[in-house]
Amino acid sequence: MNRLAAYKVSLRRDIGRRRVQCVADTARVMRPLVWAERVRAFFRKLGPLAAIATVPALALVMRVAFPARSCSARWCVGGLSSLTCSVF
């Protein structure tokens, strides 16, 4: 009976050590996943702001892609492209 009790105590100690080791291993494995989840949550919060920010960005792209045709600069009359004229 004493031998059985000693084995039971030893087994409980072993189970306790293994639980601690499992917790440490799980925390180590989960660290990158927790970081990835934080990044995903951050970008989900930016979603509505990204939609608002696209309007000025689209306006800028349109202005560069389709520049104004009127140019009062002297060198534009000489045949430089309208893109060059809209920059100066």
Image (cartoon, rainbow, N blue to C red):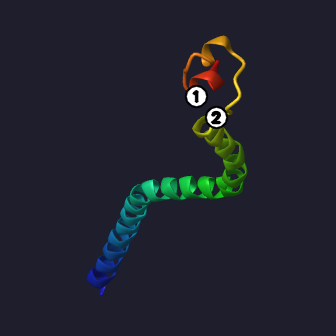
**Which residue has dot 1 on it?**
83
Residue 73 location, quadrant: top right
Query: Where does residue 24 sit, x and y in percent of width and height?
Result: 41, 58
Residue type beneath disc 1: Leu
Residue 13 location, quadrant: bottom left
**Which residue has dot 2 on it?**
67
Question: Which residue does the image show at 30% across and 82% down from the upper left?
Answer: 2
In the picture as drawn, the residue positioned furthest to the bottom comes out as 1
| In the image: residue 19, left or right of residue 64 | left
User: 80 or 84: which is nearer to us?
Assistant: 80
Q: Which quadrant of the figure contains the C terminus?
A: top right
Tag 1 secondary structure:
helix
Question: Which residue does the image show at 31% across and 76% down from the upper left?
Answer: 6
> Alpha carbon of mark 2 to alpha carbon of mark 1: how far?
6 Å
Query: Where does residue 72 sit, x and y in percent of width and height?
Result: 72, 18
| In the image: residue 68, left or right of residue 11 | right
Q: Compare marks 2 and 1 and give the one earlier in the sequence.
A: 2
Marks 2 and 1: CB-CB under 8 Å?
Answer: yes
In the picture as drawn, the residue positioned furthest to the front comes out as 78
